Image (cartoon, rainbow, N blue to C red):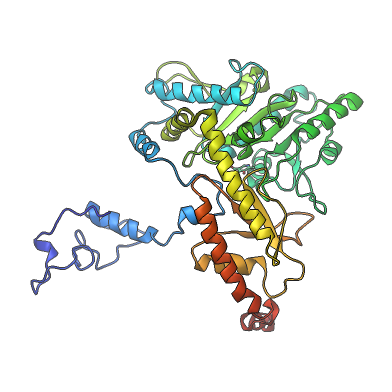
Amino acid sequence: MTLHSGASESDRTRSGHAVNPFYGEADPVAGMATAPPRHTLPDGPLAPHTAYQFVHDELMLDGNSRLNLATFVTTWMEPQAGVLMAECQDKNMIDKDEYPRTAELEKRCVAILADLWHAPDPATAVGCSTTGSSEACMLAGMALKRRWMRRNADRYPGAARPNLVMGANVQVCWEKFCNFWEIEARQVPMEGDRFHLDAASAAALCDENTIGVVAILGSTFDGSYEPVAEICAALDDLQERTGLDIPVHVDGASGGMVAPFLDPDLEWDFRLPRVASINTSGHKYGLVYPGVGWALWRDAEALPEELVFRVNYLGGDMPTFALNFSRPGAQVAAQYYTFLRLGRDGYRAVQQATRDVACSMAERIGALDDFRLLTRGDELPVFAFTTADDVTAFDVFDVSRRMKERGWLIPAYTFPANREDLSVLRVVCRNGFSQDLADLFLTDLEQLLTELRRQPHPLERPERMATAFHH
Ligand SMILES: *Cc1c(COP(=O)(O)O)cnc(C)c1O
């Protein structure tokens, strides 16, 4: 697309030949033959089409989001959603009195999620939209901390230091939460082929200073669901033995919008009385462009009233719980659109198609002698794999780097404690990643493997030998 509006006198060179007006004209307003300053404000304005073209052209160097198999975030929506979002991009979510219908759509989304996640009484479940799961986790974590503080007012602040129990596979937002709010992060390490939190280890780390346990549905490292019901049962047992009543927060950033449609019998949500709060990313399997997330509490008691602010200077009296004040409203409108557009059957169809692609892709990769699967894409539509034990000619980082040459963005990374020895590749399948694209990916991967199998061992390659020499 070009936003230029036709040739003019300034579009002509001195010799009189018409040239491309953007790229052949040194005029600072009309042309692009000189680069504008990058780190200071330019002295004067540029024409809108020129400024557009500079920014547009630079962004061509970004990766293609649709080929980005690293991200969980929605990279394809229907055109109608794009139109709706463009219509709402000037709406500020905080102006609830001025934009009452946007506020109403947010409320409806909370009610829809409360129902979907089996809140005991969806009418009294409380919740809010956020910029993503990270903000939602901060809010849920603060509620856990505040509830613990109330129960331990005699010891805190003072001698007691609150802690939060989680697996070492948590998303970084939980490390941020613990750092920002001065909570000890008690992490259960991975062990052998257990790549996420298990019930016995979670209960064993709890004590009188534990504000809660975080269970993840599912893990960003490998797409596996943590055993939320087992974790709750182990905490029930702990309560019987010790009297400690530890609430659970479910980080359903991805799985909160997958499991209700594909695994309806899996009990991970408010059906479990110990689950106090749940978050999800509307912009992951909620199928909305970034950034929107959701935080819900099972009832008003789970969210201490003193954390909720009453904003009245915009007119009206509106309760809000958020870290941000101003925040875009378009994503909330798009979430409501998607709920309305797809319904239960539509979500089930989309998530099932995505899971089918993930499972068949995982199976085909697992069938190659070069790789060993860690997960199969049958929980989150996400799977992780590593090189087979006898593969020495290349490692997962080579595969990641070389697939990039073909446009595919597939991350390679090492696992956390105690499996730092394990390096994996991970594929996140999303709406819009069709079987056809998956076939193209596999064709490229197989071609690459024929090259990689022939190359010298990593430690014998000239560039690595040079590095080794210098050290
Ligand atoms: C993505 C993710 C987050 C962070 O969510 P954002 O929406 O990106 O802020 C938190 N927890 C888990 C398990 C995630 O997958």
Q: Nearer the viewer, residue 115 or 85?
A: 115
Report the residue that reaches farthest toward the right. 241
Q: Nearer the viewer, residue 433 or 321?
A: 433
Residue 68, can we see it? Answer: no
The picture places residue 142, in percent across and down from the top left corner, at 65, 31
Q: Does residue 69 sit above or below 246 in this rendering?
A: below
Picture quarter with the N terminus: bottom left
The picture places residue 272, in percent across and down from the top left corner, at 74, 25
Q: Does residue 197 sit above or below 236 in this rendering?
A: below
Name the image quarter holding residue 389.
Answer: bottom right
The picture places residue 189, in percent across and down from the top left corner, at 79, 49
At x 12% / y 70%, what residue is drawn?
13
Q: Nearer the viewer, residue 470 or 232?
A: 232
Q: Does residue 328 sit above or below 444 in this rendering?
A: above
| Left or right, residue 46 beside residue 93 | left
Quadrant where ligand 1 appears: top right
Picture quarter with the C terminus: bottom right
